[in-house]
Amino acid sequence: MRAHGRRYRGGFTLVEMMIVILVIIALIGIAMPNWMKARESARTQSCLANLRQISTAKERYVMDQRKTSGDPVAMSDLVPDFLKNQPACPAGGAYDPRPVGIEPTCTIPGHELP
């Protein structure tokens, strides 16, 4: 098709492509912080679930071994008899089962049982 002696060329102009790229960058800029927050929240929730499993396994161990308040508990006491395998914190922290009567902990701040 010709318009005023020129042939019509389909496609996008450089300006149109730049506008599309800028819109995509703006959307990524808005979505990225929310995605990061959701990922961190998921890691925290997963860690708390692991701490609850360790706490339950520790309670069963204490009852089975007739331990009393303040007696030390090691992760090796819980694995493999009371936990199938040693859980790992998704944020890279380390778990400490703590003595009898104290909730287990994680080395990552904010990863603690209520």
Image: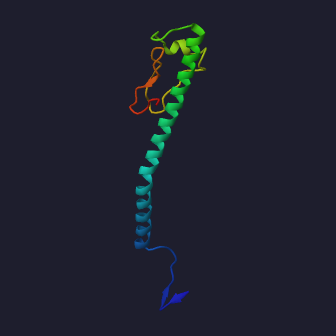
Q: Is residue 81 above or below residue 39?
A: above
Q: Is residue 9 above or below residue 85?
A: below
Query: Residue at position x 44%, y 24% from top?
Result: 105
Q: Nearer the viewer, residue 13 or 112?
A: 112
Q: What x and y, as percent, mark residue 55?
A: 53, 22
Q: Residue furthest bottom?
A: 4
User: Which quarter of the picture shows residue 21?
Assistant: bottom left
Query: Residue at position x 49%, y 12% from top?
Result: 73
Q: Quadrant of the N terminus?
A: bottom right
Q: What x and y, as percent, mark residue 107?
A: 40, 26
Query: Residue at position x 41%, y 60% from top?
Result: 25
Q: Nearer the viewer, residue 80 or 60?
A: 60
Q: Residue furthest left?
A: 109
User: Which quarter of the picture shows residue 85?
Assistant: top right
Q: Describe residue 15's horizontal placement relative to residue 83 as left or right.
A: left
Q: Nearer the viewer, residue 85 or 72?
A: 72
Q: Residue furthest top?
A: 66
Q: Is residue 56 above or below residue 26?
A: above
Query: Residue at position x 44%, y 29% from top?
Result: 112
User: Which quarter of the picture shows residue 62?
Assistant: top right
